[in-house]
Image: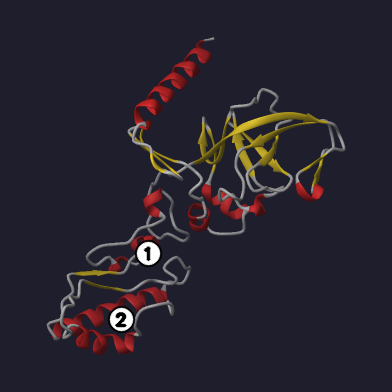
Amino acid sequence: MGRTGVLESQAEAFLADLVTLPGLRLASIYTHFPDADAEDLSFAHAQATRFQALIDRLAARDIKPARVHAANSAGLLNVSEARFDGVRVGLVAYGHVPPSARIPIALEPVMSFKSRLVQVRDLPAGASVSYGRTWVASRASRIGVVAVGYGHGLSWLLSNRGRMLVRGAQVPVVGRVTMDLTMVDLTDLPVAEVGDEVVLFGTQGESSVSLEQVAEWSETLPYEVMCTIGKRVSRIYVSGGKPVKLTSLVGEREDWTRQAADHFRRRELAVQAARRA
């Protein structure tokens, strides 16, 4: 990687000296792939081979770390000889396949980013939206205000180019994303109203906006999209389709599980009643 650690040419001597120091125990040794998701995997395979050779040389010196690991998500799928004692999955743990994965694997995304409409307003043709007046209505338009912005981790680059889900329909982001609020065009979705769930990435009914789509619109990687969601955004952990924990900026809400379960149950009953009607 050229980032941290010890050069391969120095690693054997370094570790041989390290294990002689009092009070230290060699718990593990690892390497990290810079391009295990590349089209050309020759460097990654050579890196795994060199790493194994180092492990063998250390074993000949009776230096045997308790754990040896190398593979990230891409390495797990693309460099089978690098699985060793364990793997360090990141993207795969969230249900996403790294680019150029060589092994077909069926994964289901487990993370969604959601908010709600906090205002719906009608604007005449010619009215502008948000800072810089970068979007001007070409027709009478219905604009929804979503309680999310770059202060929560939504990329400013989604201004005038991102899309969100409202009532199962994709609606475009209009105007610039602001610190706490983002606007969407609801003109073609007149049934939308204040309080409606908005999905920034994830599924809603039969529709979805993928993490990869948001990353493409934001000119970045799926990793960054997930990592930049800030602490101001509450996290709801779900198991078996039911919420089990909520964490927020002020910590974990221990009393929230029962309240959330009641809320989800009431919402599901309301949806069922609406379908029957």
- Give the quarter of the image for residue 90: bottom left
Q: Amino acid at mark 2?
A: Arg
123 lies left or right of 273: right
Q: Is 213 above or below relative to 274?
A: below
- Picture coordinates of residue 111 (x, y %)? 44, 44
First in sequence, mark 2 or 1: give its number.
Answer: 2
| Residue lying at 69% horizontally and 28% vertically, measured from the top left | 189
- Picture coordinates of residue 95 (x, y %)? 40, 48
- Residue 242 appears in the picture as rendered: no
Q: Which mark is residue 37?
A: none
| Numbered disc in front, either 2 or 1 | 2
Q: Is 109 above or below relative to 265?
A: below
Q: Are marks 2 and 1 in contact (CB under 8 Å)?
A: no
140 lies left or right of 17: right
Q: Amino acid at mark 1?
A: Asn
| Residue lying at 44% horizontally and 19% vertically, measured from the top left | 266
- Picture coordinates of residue 180 (x, y %)? 63, 44
Q: Which residue is mark 2?
A: 50
Q: Residue furthest top?
A: 277
Instruction: Give the crowd class for mark 2: few <14, some 14-19, many >=20 residues within 10 Å.
Output: few
**Element under label 1?**
helix
Q: Which residue is mark 1?
A: 78
Q: Nearer the viewer, residue 207 or 184?
A: 184
